[in-house]
């Protein structure tokens, strides 16, 4: 797992190996839990499949992939370029140069099973094999077809105008005052929506529908009589919900009810029980830019699997900084780059 974003924080603990192991493990667990929540997985039932090569053989194996047990951490060795530690179940190695934490794999380690061995032939000159294969491919009329790339649309999880997460709207809409004046009824737990800046629709007005200019809400409302644009939103765990681009100016993406999308996002961000305890006292466990940076997501990305079904749209989290890169026409990167 790449932890480059946390390098400065991790390096502070080099002089205390117990703190170093705890810091790395806590960050790793936080990232894993966010992914588990994003994908609808449980944190104690995950398995890692991997392939190793032996002489003339490929070995397919699987091993348990648990969270690091921070209550049983034991530092092992510290070198100038790496740090080894264990939690009694798995062994880990953190490399300072590229800020990566690895879990050790091996046939003899606990909770590991060899699933299958496959006999293979190792080519003496793989480059010559590839060269000759291409020659044969072209000589028989073969044509290379470029792989289709997804046309992503990125949305920020924060206010693009001031680069902050509002304390009582957007992802924190659940933390707002009661909807009716004089009411003491709390906002629904997990009520939230994704804020969409005008600049996005100005830059990509026809991404949602080639016949609808999303930057001209007034025209859409006048011609259709509708105040929102409906879609089918496909979640990473395979479920699908009805959603809408809502509010004047199509400035929000939300599901109905709003807490479907809200709870998926908030759960991945580690917000437990997103609701005020009292109607007149704001909650403190809200989404902030610091939390987005810690988790590693500050955007979501939308895409289609079938261009013939424009209203079927998939959603997932995007790496920190993705929306800014999208708006600046910069190449999207991942932490592994």
Image (cartoon, rainbow, N blue to C red):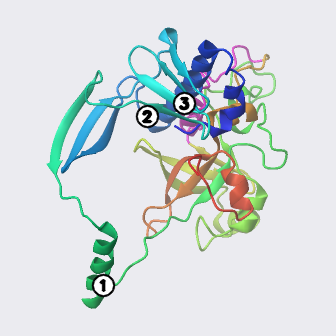
Gap in angstroms between the C-alphas marked 3 and 1: 44 Å
Q: At 69% across and 62% down in the image, what residue appears?
A: 330
Up-down relation of residue 18 to residue 37 (above or below): above
The kind of secondary structure element at disc 3 is strand
**Label 3: few (<14), some (14–19) or many (≥20) C-alpha neighbours in 10 Å:** many
Q: Is residue 306 magenta?
A: no
Q: Which mark is residue 94?
A: 3
The residue beneath circle 2 is 40
**Label 2: few (<14), some (14–19) or many (≥20) C-alpha neighbours in 10 Å:** some
The kind of secondary structure element at disc 1 is helix
Position in image of residue 275 (x %, y %): 65, 22
Question: Which stretch is magenta?
Answer: 256-279
76 vs 144, nearest the viewer: 76
Up-down relation of residue 205 to residue 74 (above or below): below
Among the two numbered marks 3 and 2 on one chain, the one whose residue lies closer to the N terminus: 2
Among the two numbered marks 2 and 1 on one chain, the one whose residue lies closer to the N terminus: 2
32 vs 115, nearest the viewer: 115
38 vs 78, nearest the viewer: 78
Position in image of residue 38 (x %, y %): 50, 37
**Within the image, what quadrant is residue 122 found in?**
bottom left
145 vs 132, nearest the viewer: 132
């Amino acid at each position: 797992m790449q932890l480059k974003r946390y390098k400065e924080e991790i390096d502070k603990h080099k002089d205390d190996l117990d703190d170093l192991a705890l810091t790395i493990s806590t960050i790793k667990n936080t990232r894993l839990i966010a992914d588990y929540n994003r994908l609808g997985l449980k944190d104690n039932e995950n398995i890692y499949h991997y392939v190793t090569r032996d002489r003339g053989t490929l070995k397919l194996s699987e091993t348990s992939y648990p969270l690091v047990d921070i209550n049983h951490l034991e530092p092992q060795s510290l070198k100038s370029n790496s740090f080894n530690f264990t939690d009694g179940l798995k062994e880990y190695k953190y490399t300072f140069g590229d800020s990566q934490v690895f879990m050790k794999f091996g046939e003899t380690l606990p909770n590991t099973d060899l699933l299958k061995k496959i006999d293979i032939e190792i080519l003496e000159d793989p480059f010559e094999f590839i060269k000759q294969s291409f020659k044969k491919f072209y000589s028989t009329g073969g044509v290379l077809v470029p792989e289709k790339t997804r046309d992503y649309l990125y949305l920020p999880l924060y206010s693009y105008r001031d680069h902050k997460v509002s304390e009582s709207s957007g992802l924190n809409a659940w933390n707002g005052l009661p909807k009716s004046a004089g009411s003491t009824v709390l906002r629904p737990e997990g009520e939230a929506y994704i804020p969409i800046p005008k600049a996005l629709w100005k830059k990509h007005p026809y991404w949602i529908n080639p016949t609808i200019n999303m930057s001209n809400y007034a025209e859409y409302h006048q011609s259709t009589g509708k105040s929102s644009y409906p879609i089918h939103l496909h979640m990473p765990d395979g479920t699908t919900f009805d959603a809408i681009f809502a509010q004047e100016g199509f400035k929000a993406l939300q599901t109905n009810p709003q807490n479907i999308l809200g709870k998926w996002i908030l759960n991945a961000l580690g917000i437990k029980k997103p609701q005020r305890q009292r109607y007149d006292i704001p909650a403190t466990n809200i989404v902030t830019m610091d939390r987005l940076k810690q988790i590693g997501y500050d955007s979501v990305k939308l895409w289609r699997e079938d261009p013939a079904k424009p209203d079927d749209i998939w959603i997932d989290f995007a790496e920190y900084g993705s929306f800014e890169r999208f708006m600046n026409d910069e190449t999207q990167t991942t932490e592994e780059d």
